Image (cartoon, coloured by chain):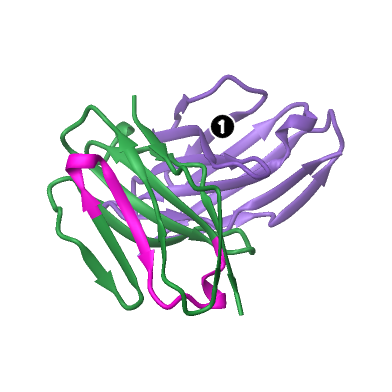
Chain colours: A purple, B green
Amino acid sequence: SQTIHQWPATLVQPVGSPLSLECTVEGTSNPNLYWYRQAAGRGLQLLFYSVGIGQISSEVPQNLSASRPQDRQFILSSKKLLLSDSGFYLCASIGQNYGYTFGSGTRLTVV
Amino acid sequence: AQKVTQAQTEISVVEKEDVTLDCVYETRDTTYYLFWYKQPPSGELVFLIRRNSFDEQNEISGRYSWNFQKSTSSFNFTITASQVVDSAVYFCALSEGNTGANSKLTFGKGITLSVRP
C-alpha cells in the first residue's frame, strides 16, 4: 500500500517569506501526484497535479508553484507568501492500483 | 465540468441516532468514481469508500451504508446508531475517467457532523 510523507505538520510564516512544502510517496512507482488546499471552513481545492517527473499542471492561478524533481517527490513552493495562502495543504497520490491516498497535511498560517 | 454538491453544511445529532449525509454530483462522463472521506479534527483525510459508475449496488460496512442512485445522481451516506467518534467533517468527491490526468478529485464543501453524548 502507498504511504505519503508530508512535512512539516504546521508552519507559521510571515508575509513575503518563501515557502517549501515537501511530499514523498512510498509503496508505488510512477504515481499521479496532487496538491490540494483547504481554506478555513471550506472544501478542498486542487492546486496542482503531476503525471510524471517534471510534468506539472496548474488548476488555478495563484501565488504558488509546484515541482516534481523525482518520481515520488512533489514540492509546493512560493517565493513570497500572501495572507491568502494560509490553509491546510494536502498531498495526494494515485498509485498503480488506483488507490487514492492522502498525506497527513501541513497547516500553514501566514502572519 | 464535474461538480459535487453537499447541501447540508452542519448536522447535529444525539448519540445512537441515525444520520444521512447527502451528496449530489454532476458529470458528463459515463465512467466516473465517487468517494466519501472523513476528516477528523486532526485534519487527515480518511478514506471511507470508492464506488465506480457501473456498480449501483448499495454497500454496507458495519454502521456505515451508502446509497448510490444514478437516476438522481446521488451518493448518500448513512451512519446508523451514531457515536461521538463519528464527529468529523465528511466529504463527498468525484473523479472522472481512468487513472491519469483526469483522475483529479472534485470535492464537495463538506458536512460537519456533531454527535452529542
* Label 1 residue SS: strand
- A60 vs B49, left or right, is right
Name the residue nearer the viewer: B92 or A12: B92
Look at the image and say whether residue B69 sits in the magenta stretch: yes
Give the residue displayed 70% in from the left and 50% down from the top: A107
- The part of the chain drawn in magenta is B68-88
Quarter of the image for the C terminus of chain B: give it.
bottom right
- Residue at the (60%, 41%) spot, across then down: A42
Q: Residue at x 55, y 75 (%)?
A: B85
Q: In which chain is the residue bearing label 1?
A: A
- Position in image of residue B5 (x %, y %): 42, 39
In the rendered structure, does residue B71 fall within the stretch colored magenta? yes
Q: Provide residue A43's location: percent of width, then percent of height.
A: 55, 42
Query: Is residue A100 toward the left or the right of residue B89 in the image?
Result: left
The residue tagged 1 is: A66
Would you identify the image quadrant in which residue B13 lies?
bottom right
- Residue under the image location 27 percent in, 51 percent down: A98
Outermost residue on the top side: it is A61
How many neighbours does mark 1 have within 10 angstroms: few (below 14), some (14-19), or many (20 or more)? Answer: many
